[in-house]
Image: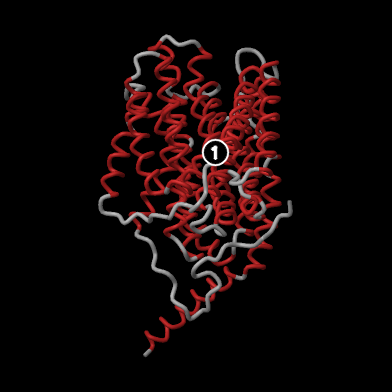
Amino acid sequence: MALTTSVEPIPGAGRSATSTEPARPPRRLLFLVALAPALANADAGIVSLALPEIRGELSMTLTGVHWVTNIYVLLVGALQLLGGRLADLAGARRLFLRALAGFALASAACGAAPTGELLVGARALQALTAAVLVPAAMSLLLAATPGRAQRTRALALWAATGGLGSVAGVLLGGLVVSGFDWRWAFYLNVPLVAAALLMVRGTALPDPRPLPGTRLDLAGAVTLTGALLAFVYALVRFSEHGGDRTVLHALGAGLVLGVLFVLRQRLGRDPLLPRAVLTRLPLVAGAVGILAVSAATAPVVFLGSAHLQQAQQYSPALAGCALLPMVGGIILVGRGCSRVLARRGPGLPCAVGAALVAAGLLLLSGLTPASQYVTGVLPGIALTGAGLPLVWMACEVLALTPFTGQHAGLAAGVVQSAGQLGAALGLALAVAVVNSLATGTTSADGLGTAFAVSALLVVPALVVAVVGVRDARSSGTYASDAGALRTRATRATRALRT
């Protein structure tokens, strides 16, 4: 199976400098669809800090309370690709609205759960809706931005809100746990979704046409979902119990189901992952880059917060506030990154971002139980926060720009699944390293080694940067977009002079 760099026709791409750029989509529309990854990512961070209170009130075991977060990571990571395919086949607009409402209802059910078992079940429903909501929202975003320059800006906004949601979730989690009941970690989603649904009434959502004459590959969906579930479960289990027999059985089941899925895709009439999608080099490279940077940075918030609470005796709220410099880096760098991407392409931002992330993680690798916040934690999280949006935005632009209406939901599902699987992989490896090197009553002794291992995971992102440079040079569309910007600026200057 040969990889290609061909792209689907994009209205406005490769246009002359004198042509008119397609009208920009309304900001309300961009905000509405970008809310999806923020909700999904923030929810995981908020709930993780509420686990001690949940365990105490619902009398759950340590293993049982961890499944409040594990079931969410497991299902969202495994089902987003299927959710993206459903968006292509059934209509992204309809699925987006239904999944958004379903997410709010599932969140309310989580908050009202009287027992641990019902809470885990409600969390499973919440994960199912999130797995459909995020790729459907991405499909709407791609449909609303036909021009390459405006699509680059929109994807940069998407990546920024998703990354911001991940980090802000920890901050909000600390505030919710310290100032309110743990149930508000779930109830908080209800008014946010209600406001979003009210915004829909005054927003013209695009309605991409479903793929005609294509049926859902049920056998492919079952085998792929089963394989991903097995792999993610093995990672979650490995992070908690090490490489026991259950982990080996899960990996074996995942391999068998993966082989069956590949055979089904080669022989089936309407494969779940068409060859035209899998052979796109930009999509494959972008997904690999997102998987790598997600695996590298996922432990930062979790282990950094754990170090501050255990070694420095920070409260959950104070630990969340201490991570604000990482949020600031994501916001500040994300605002300017879209312009660089639109003019220079994804190669340079990806390389610079990967270098910043690696430098931040290497600084954090010097952490010891005696490390203070200002000298030991702050520089590392600031550099990591500055580099993360550069890599993430560049990889999403590289991966998704070739797709318009056809297969847009599926491509979005591939990218989002890569992020979720990368986070699960990185966190599992980091926790395993920390646990293996822990001594005494604290697990802080292995933090440095865990961050050093995470820094090595950034290497694939540098390879993606090379692919991004080739893509920008071969397509020439970034140069044409920059030329169009310069032409409009020149005309405006001449008009002012006359």
Furthest toward the bottom, the residue is 498
Residue at image position (63%, 36%) is 364
Give residue 280's position: percent from left, percent from top.
65, 55
Residue at image position (63%, 54%) is 276
Q: Against 481, is 6 above or below?
A: above
In this orientation, which residue lies closer to the viewer: 49 or 241?
Answer: 241
Residue 437 visible, this orientation: no
User: What kind of colouring is applied to the model shown?
Assistant: secondary structure
Give residue 254's position: percent from left, percent from top.
66, 28
Q: Against 235, is 32 above or below?
A: below
Q: Against 184, is 291 above or below?
A: below
> Badge 1, how many Cα within 10 Å: few under 14, some, many 20+?
many
Q: Which residue is mark 1?
A: 378
Residue 196 visible, this orientation: yes
Give residue 457's position: percent from left, percent from top.
68, 40
Residue 379: name its quadrant.
Answer: top right
Residue at image position (54%, 38%) is 378
